[in-house]
Image (tube, rainbow, N blue to C red):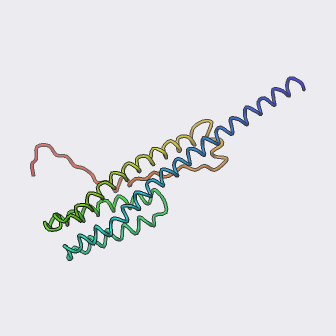
Amino acid sequence: MDYQTTILYGLAFVLGILTIHIYNRLVRSWQRVREAWSGVEVQLTQRASLIPNLVETVKGYARHESHVFEEVTRLRTILQEAPGPAEAGKVNHDLHWSLGRLLAVAENYPQLKASDNFKELQTELSFLEEKIAYARQFYNASVQLYNTTIQSFPYLFLASVLRFRPAEFFQAEDKDRPVVKVEFGKIK
């Protein structure tokens, strides 16, 4: 074998090893995104399972607040059927606010607030909301790392050839976020 052939084989070998390394990193990154999304789904499912008990408990005390119960139930169903993280993020935001309204209804009923069952459900819901926030944060960090990887040199070449696509973040749209207005000097 002559010198040039040896160099070509050496370059081909190095290029092959580099390609394998890049591919494996892309796959690991994508798998982390999938794992993180599964963590979010677990928490959303647990909350979805808790919601009917919470609604029924409050419903027993506040029969005339049916619009709140219907809204929570409707959003729970939509969230369970959401096709992806972006859609789930939008519905999750609305469900979070509807659950807040449901708990506000409960504030009007002292017997309900004193109920051990309601207190337990409320504590469990609060705990699940924290777990959802943590799972969302982990998922979004994984998505950011993955999206950065597939758009960075040299990964972007193999990523585009193998059709690795950017992942969606799990968050509400900016227009859906409430605007906080701060006014100093006014007491209401």
Residue 44: quarter of image = bottom left
The spot of residue 155 in percent (x, y) is 61, 39
The spot of residue 22 in percent (x, y) is 64, 39
User: Does 21 sit above or below residue 143?
Assistant: above
Judge from the rendering whether residue 2 lies leftward or rightward of residue 95; answer left or right: right
The spot of residue 99 in percent (x, y) is 28, 63
Q: Nearer the viewer, residue 42 or 188?
A: 42
* Residue at x 51%, y 49% (from the top left corner): 33
Q: Nearer the viewer, residue 46 or 20?
A: 46
Quadrant including the N terminus: top right
The spot of residue 116 in percent (x, y) is 21, 64
Name, please, the residue furthest toward the top. Answer: 3
Name, please, the residue furthest toward the front. Answer: 116
User: Does 108 sit above or below residue 34?
Assistant: below
* Residue at x 48%, y 55% (from the top left corner): 38
* Residue at x 36%, y 50% (from the top left corner): 133
Q: Nearer the viewer, residue 128 or 85?
A: 128
Q: How many marks?
A: 0
Residue 89: quarter of image = bottom left
Judge from the rendering whether residue 128 lies leftward or rightward of residue 21; answer left or right: left
Q: Nearer the viewer, residue 74 or 178?
A: 74
Judge from the rendering whether residue 94 lies leftward or rightward of residue 180; answer left or right: right
Name, please, the residue furthest toward the left. Answer: 187
Judge from the rendering whether residue 29 lies leftward or rightward of residue 78; answer left or right: right
* Residue at x 57%, y 43% (from the top left corner): 150
